[in-house]
Image (cartoon, rainbow, N blue to C red):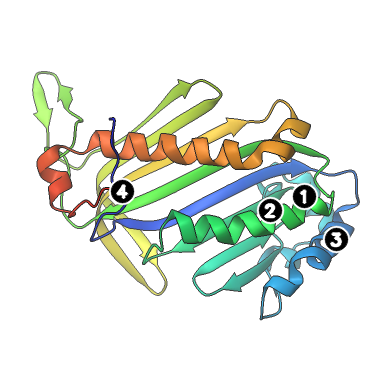
Amino acid sequence: MNKLPAKIDPCPVQEAILEIRYSSKFPSDAIFGMFYGKIGSLFDGKPISLPILQIPEAIRRQDPSLKYKAYHQFVSGKHTLNIGPDVLTFSTNTPYCGWEEWSAFFYEILSKSIDAEVMTKVERLGLRYINHFKNNIFGKIHCEIDLIGKKLKKESTNIRTEEVDGDYIKILQIGNSVTMVKGNHSISGSIIDIDILCNIENSMSFLKNYIEVVENAHIKEKELFFSLMKDSFLEEFNPIYGE
């Protein structure tokens, strides 16, 4: 696609997540304090201690499934920052405010976090968008599944695929019968779930050029999302194109 919409309405984004996995030369119990000294003033409320802290530290550090879990959380409106000794996770919920506002939120925090020099090595960056649609999207998107000569459209179907694109891995999940939990209620329908991963080979280069890496991930996510939508389906969302 040559031209991507700057905005669509209604916006199907239910959640957007930016995750940075890292390692540090500092003890795990000192890391949060170092981050807090740099970014605490950006938030009005106090940090929230997450339930994982109720698990003894020895168990937390030995269980691989808990390695990239956050220990503390900051909330600013509908934006959230989660901090762990191995991970930073930024997220924003519906209604999606748009890339300009959300990226301004996490770029400021990332800049100050990098100044704290806590992240000795950056391992991976991930940018994920989860889009929800009330109705069945098969037949409306450029995705056909042929099973023994039968094209699946109305049947309950979920697919997952990965594609390597330069330094990035694009993970795409599509489902037409999915239930998501939002707050205290659940919603059902179809999803387009796109996760753009970048394994970081040179931490020093990333820490100097992280904006470029994130922006490229965002472009790849938008290109994949809009390339999936047939023109007639896209028109249902009243696309607005920028300059």
Number of marks in the image?
A: 4
Judge by depth and name the residue closer to the eye, 147 or 182.
Answer: 182
Please give left or right for residue 7 compared with residue 42 in the image.
Answer: left
Please give left or right for residue 187 compared with residue 208 in the image.
Answer: left
- Between the C-alphas of marks 1 and 2, the distance is 6 Å
Residue 120 location, x and y as percent?
83, 40
- Between the C-alphas of marks 3 and 1, the distance is 11 Å
Amino acid beneath label 1: Ile
Amino acid beneath label 3: Met
**Rendered residue at 74%/27% (across/down):** 202
- Between the C-alphas of marks 1 and 4, the distance is 32 Å
Residue 223 location, x and y as percent?
35, 35
Amino acid beneath label 4: Gly
Of the two numbered discs 4 and 3 on the same chain, state the one appearing first in sequence.
3
Look at the image and tell me whether residue 154 can be seen: no
Disc 3 residue crowd, few under 14, some 14–19, many 20+, Cα 10 Å: some
Task: Say which quarter of the image contains residue 3.
Answer: top left
Dots 3, 2 in contact, CB < 8 A: no
Rendered position, 91 above or below 171: below
- Residue highlighted by disc 1: 114
Please give left or right for residue 55 compared with residue 2 in the image.
Answer: right
- Residue highlighted by disc 4: 242
- Between the C-alphas of marks 3 and 2, the distance is 13 Å
**Dot in front, 1 or 4:** 4
Query: Residue 34's mark?
Result: 3
- Between the C-alphas of marks 4 and 3, the distance is 40 Å
